[in-house]
Amino acid sequence: MAPKYILHYFDLTALGEPIRYLLSYGNINWEDNRYSAAQWETIKSTMPYGQMPVLHIDDKIFAQSSAISRYLAKRVGLSGKDDLENLQIDQAVDLYHDFRQKISEWYYDPIPESKAAKEVLLKEQVPFYLNKFQQIVKENKGFLVNGKLTWADIYFVAPLKYFKDLYGRDFLEGYPLLQELVKKVESTPAIAKYIAKRPVGDRWRDPDFKYTLKYHF
């Protein structure tokens, strides 16, 4: 019998969205449990590390977005063909974490002076990372690894909406290869079907959510 999957995450895209994309891509039956900030406070103590996303697989619960995504990628055929390809995938995913962390640290910084200083750096850091990703995609025939769709591409694309919103503009303007990568991922039939019916989500503008989420990104 197939495992029972239940995803627990906020009513947002962000770090829960790669998991949703992978579950959708694999046509896996799953429950999408989305929480408000108020609901989160009542269940936080039940989570392994006091944060989400977490994935219930039958009667066991697992945390950490990358680890869950790596597991699901194996289930749905989006991991590497060998150790070297898996190393390339992990490298791209870790680089993405470095990138989104810069945006998150700036956006959720509660100290105005510190936030202003980070904003100056961000104007240099965002192009730095995007140029790196653009070059990787160019060298890999339109994808992040060896000219084919892997979970690295999904991990790059799925949270973009959230981090673009935090940044305040579409930072992919001027990066045509990255824009094309987004189209490739989001036009995949099963993922496109999920996107068409998913909740609006991204309630990060809610002050309660902003207070809650600063501990997750």
Image: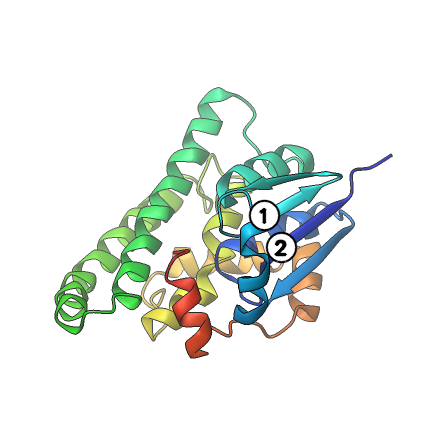
N-term-proximal mark, 2 vs 1: 2
- In the rendered view, would you say 175 is above or below 58? below
- Type of the residue with mark 1: Val
- Colour mapping: rainbow
Residue at the right extreme, as displayed: 1
Q: Which disc number belongs to residue 208? A: none
Q: Circle 2 — which element?
A: strand
Q: Amino acid at mark 2?
A: His
Circle 2 Cα neighbour tier, 10 Å, few/some/many (<14 / 14–19 / ≥20):
many
The N terminus, quarter of image:
top right
Residue depicted at 47% across the width and 27% down the height? 85
User: Percent from the top left, x then y, of residue 32?
Assistant: 69, 58
Residue 215 coordinates in the image, percent (x, y): 38, 57
Spatial CA distance of label 2 from label 1 is 5 Å
Mark 1 lies on a secondary structure that is strand
**Image location of residue 119, percent across then percent down:** 18, 67
In the current view of this chain or complex, which residue is farthest to the top?
Answer: 83
* Residue name at image x 40 percent, y 71 percent: 210
The residue singled out by tag 1 in the image is: 54
Q: Quadrant of the C terminus?
A: bottom left
Residue drawn at (57%, 72%) of the image: 201
Of residues 167 and 56, the one drawn nearer to the viewer in this rendering: 56
122 on left or right of 216: left
Q: Residue at x 63, y 64 (%)?
A: 34
Q: Nearer the viewer, residue 127 or 63?
A: 63
**Rendered view: 138 above or below 130:** above
Crowd class of label 1 (few under 14; some 14 to 19; many from 20; radius 10 Å): many
Circle 2 residue: 8
Q: Are marks 2 and 1 in contact (CB under 8 Å)?
A: yes
For this view, does 180 lie left or right of residue 199? left
